[in-house]
Image: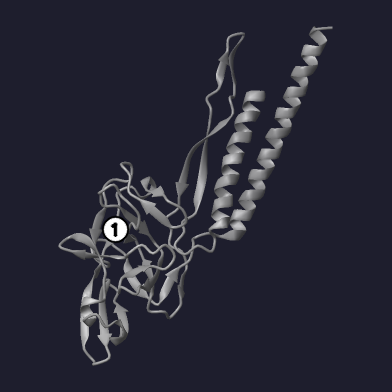
């Protein structure tokens, strides 16, 4: 009984951790909620009681991420982007990568323009990537304005991710096209915290393309994708997980007390 109760405590504890992370990121733009999936440990046949199996508890089989679309909210900021449909924005890493290219994939499109003219993630400073010759390259507005960023009147990004700059002199200059990423196995991506992910062997290699083509989602400028977390549903799940934890903890304590009592009886 004690082993069964212990597996229940461990499974419930893992579930509480997953739910707590969902709730903690309920306001994180582009965050995707996760759920724990459990399996029963196969029962063991009792030699002295043929046909009777004793259950061995439960285990957390996998923590699976939900890639369902979050609510799209309008912000009217030209530097806010949302992806409606499959895919991820592609960002470059800012730190050392041991000489190798390293990219971050995210559904969060909160951007800003740096003093050097780069379009970067507002929170991490990672540069947003555009497609150039089939490869991702940082987006820099300096060349389009001859080094005069103050000459930019507006920045527009259409549904297919084409970036254009309108200058004060009335000219419109295309800058590039956003690199949208997708993977054969989205669940295989490694979570780097919040809404940031990296490629793994399990996810498969990245496939880069343009928004609105080959099954990729479309870009909506002036909007952001909320986390796909239903706080009411998560709170109900937390109550259930807490009840499961408490029930198994009590069973574990009862088993421990019974074992201690048996030992004391035998040693008298």
User: Where in the figure is residue 254, as x and y percent of width and height?
Assistant: 76, 27
Whether residue 1 is visible here, answered yes or no, is: no
Rendered residue at 59%/28% (across/down):
57
Which quadrant of the figure has residue 5?
top right
User: Where in the figure is residue 129, as x and y percent of width and height?
Assistant: 28, 64
Residue 137, relative to residue 98: is it above or below? below
Of 182 and 190, the residue lying toward us: 190
User: Where in the figure is residue 155, as x and y percent of width and height?
Assistant: 31, 81
- Residue 31 vs residue 185: left or right? right
Residue 254, relative to residue 180: is it above or below? above
Which quadrant of the figure has residue 217?
bottom left
- Residue 120 vs residue 54: left or right? left
Q: Give the number of callouts.
A: 1
Q: Residue furthest bottom?
A: 169
Of 190 and 52, the residue lying toward us: 190
- Residue 118 vs residue 7: left or right? left
Rendered residue at 26%/87% (across/down):
167
Rendered residue at 28%/45% (across/down):
204
Quadrant holding the C terminus = top right
Quadrant holding the N terminus = top right
Residue 110, relative to residue 165: is it above or below? above
User: Where in the figure is residue 51, as x and y percent of width and height?
Assistant: 57, 15
Of 208 and 55, the residue lying toward us: 208
Which quadrant of the figure has residue 141?
bottom left
Secondary structure beneath dot 1 equals strand
Q: Residue furthest right?
A: 268
Whether residue 82 is visible here, answered yes or no, is: yes
- Way the structure is coloured: one colour
Q: Which residue is mark 1?
A: 181
- Check disc 1: other Cα within 10 Å, few if <14, some if 14-19, many if 20+: many
Q: Residue furthest left?
A: 133
């Amino acid at each position: 009984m004690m082993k069964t109760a212990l597996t229940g405590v461990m499974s419930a504890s893992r579930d509480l951790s997953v739910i707590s992370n969902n709730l903690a990121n309920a306001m994180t733009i582009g965050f995707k909620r996760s759920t724990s999936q459990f399996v029963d440990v196969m029962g063991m046949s009792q030699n002295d009681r043929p046909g009777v199996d004793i259950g061995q508890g439960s285990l957390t089989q996998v923590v699976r991420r939900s890639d369902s679309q979050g609510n799209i909210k309008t912000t009217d900021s030209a530097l806010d982007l949302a992806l409606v449909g499959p895919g991820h924005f592609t960002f470059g890493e800012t730190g050392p990568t041991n000489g190798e290219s390293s990219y971050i994939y995210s559904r969060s499109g909160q951007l800003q323009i740096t003093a050097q003219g780069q379009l970067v993630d507002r929170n991490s400073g990672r540069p947003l990537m555009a497609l150039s010759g089939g490869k991702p390259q940082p987006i820099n507005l300096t060349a389009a304005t001859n080094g005069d960023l103050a000459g930019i009147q507006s920045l527009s990004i259409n549904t297919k991710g084409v970036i254009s700059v309108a200058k004060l002199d009335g000219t419109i200059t295309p800058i590039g096209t956003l690199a949208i990423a997708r993977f054969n196995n989205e669940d295989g991506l490694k979570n780097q915290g919040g809404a940031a992910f990296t490629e793994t062997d399990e996810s498969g290699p990245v496939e880069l393309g343009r928004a609105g083509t080959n099954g990729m989602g479309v870009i909506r400028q002036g909007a952001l994708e909320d986390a796909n977390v239903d706080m009411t549903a998560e709170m109900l799940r937390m109550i259930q997980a807490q009840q499961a934890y408490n029930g198994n903890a009590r069973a574990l304590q009862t088993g421990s007390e019974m074992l201690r009592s048996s030992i004391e009886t035998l040693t008298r």
